[in-house]
Amino acid sequence: MAAIGRTDVLRCDALFISDLHLGSNQCEAGHLAAFLGCIRPRELFLVGDIIDLQAIRFNAHVDESFLTGLIDDLMTGKGEGLLDDRRLKRQNLLRTSHREVLNGLRDLLRAGTRITYIPGNHDAYLRRYAGYDTGGLAIRREAVYTTATGQRLLVRHGDEYDGLVHLHGHLAGALAHLQEHYSGWVNGVLGLLDGRRHVGDDAGRSAELILQSAVDLLARHREWPIPVSRGLSSSGGFSLAFALESALKGRTGHDRLIKRRIVRHLQREGPAAPALDGLINGHTHIPEATALALPTPTGGNGNQGPCHISYYNTGSWARSQRRLGRTGLVVAENGTIGMVRFDRRQGIEPFQPPRFPFNTYPMRPCPGCGQGVVDLEGG
């Protein structure tokens, strides 16, 4: 299927990307900077782990107080704050390709895109600046995005639902340090084997057709026949962090626990405000679109809110499984939702995420609408 090259720009109402991990050896910054030059959203949501403060400390050999002090200076100064890379360049905290991503974000801001930054666990220090809003750039702990069709989607990074992050913080830090050393070595090897690649000048199919294809693929995601094991293991790449994470989380039923917390959270939010139809997260680095059953149907009569919850994960821009990375969730101007993936050689392409990342779940018809939904309580 043809993709969007440099001569065609994908325009959409909203774009959601997460887990860029700028400053980390895992960040695929070259691809990301090229992607930002090919897309023009009205709103851009950065769904956490955008600037990897932990990795910057490891790689730039600076202590935490130095880094948090620099952030305070950037955030309390005038101008574009965190997207102004001059001080970062002066302190040699980010390599050139990573600063090009900041420049790409700044270009979108100047072109009129409104950017909402929702910090994650790797840039959690920025959560103290929740409420910051100037020049089209806002920082929030969470946000609610409403599509043109009226769907209300809660946007959070997702670490809030992850008990392992909070219970095993020191272990996670040690694994992150190990991954930085491993990724640095891998980058050196790949740099010797791999030359720079560019998107072709031929735009292929139009941006509108690519966006419609992305929407159509995601709408049919429950019928995708590729098993989970093939979807995750046939990617042609290896990630130490992903392998360790998969082994740990697959044994603990971690993904099921996270989704149960998500459902409970959205149910609690419903009575106090207009019902939420779903959630957009990052954090797991695995792109996903899943319809989650509610334990007690609330929407069967059509008056009490949605009958099931739509869960979306934006994936990541950190090097992991190659066929699952460099993804983003897009919302067309008419409110339909799709997912795209970027490749430097191919450009922007429609993307079909695997159904369930770490577990297989039983399915049952939704009592409200009959659609197949994941039963988190069964099996």
Image (cartoon, rainbow, N blue to C red):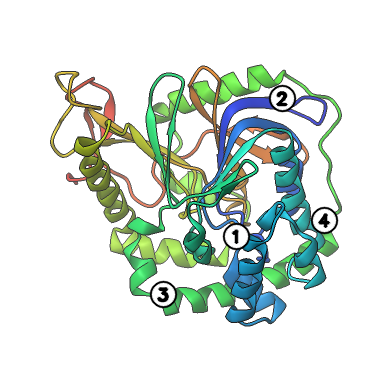
Gap between marks 3 and 2 measured at Cα: 43 Å
Gap between marks 1 and 4 measured at Cα: 16 Å
Determine whether 289 is above or below 52 in the image: above
Q: Which residue is more in the foreground, 132 or 61?
A: 132
Q: Earlier in the sequence, mark 3 or mark 4?
A: 3
Kind of residue at disc 2? Ala
Local packing at callout 3 (Cα closer than 10 Å; few below 14, some 14-19, many 20+) is: few
The numbered disc on residue 134 is none
In the rendered structure, the answer to whether residue 132 lies left or right of residue 66 reads: left
Local packing at callout 2 (Cα closer than 10 Å; few below 14, some 14-19, many 20+) is: some
Local packing at callout 4 (Cα closer than 10 Å; few below 14, some 14-19, many 20+) is: few
Q: Earlier in the sequence, mark 4 or mark 2?
A: 2
**x, y percent for residue 355:** 41, 39
List the residue tagged with mark 4: 194
Kind of residue at disc 4? Asp
Mark in the foreground, 3 or 1? 3
List the residue tagged with mark 1: 238
List the residue tagged with mark 3: 169
Which residue is at 26% across, 44% downward?
263
Which residue is at 32% across, 59% downward?
254
Q: Earlier in the sequence, mark 1 or mark 4?
A: 4
List the residue tagged with mark 2: 2
- Element marked by disc 4: loop
Gap between marks 3 and 1 measured at Cα: 24 Å
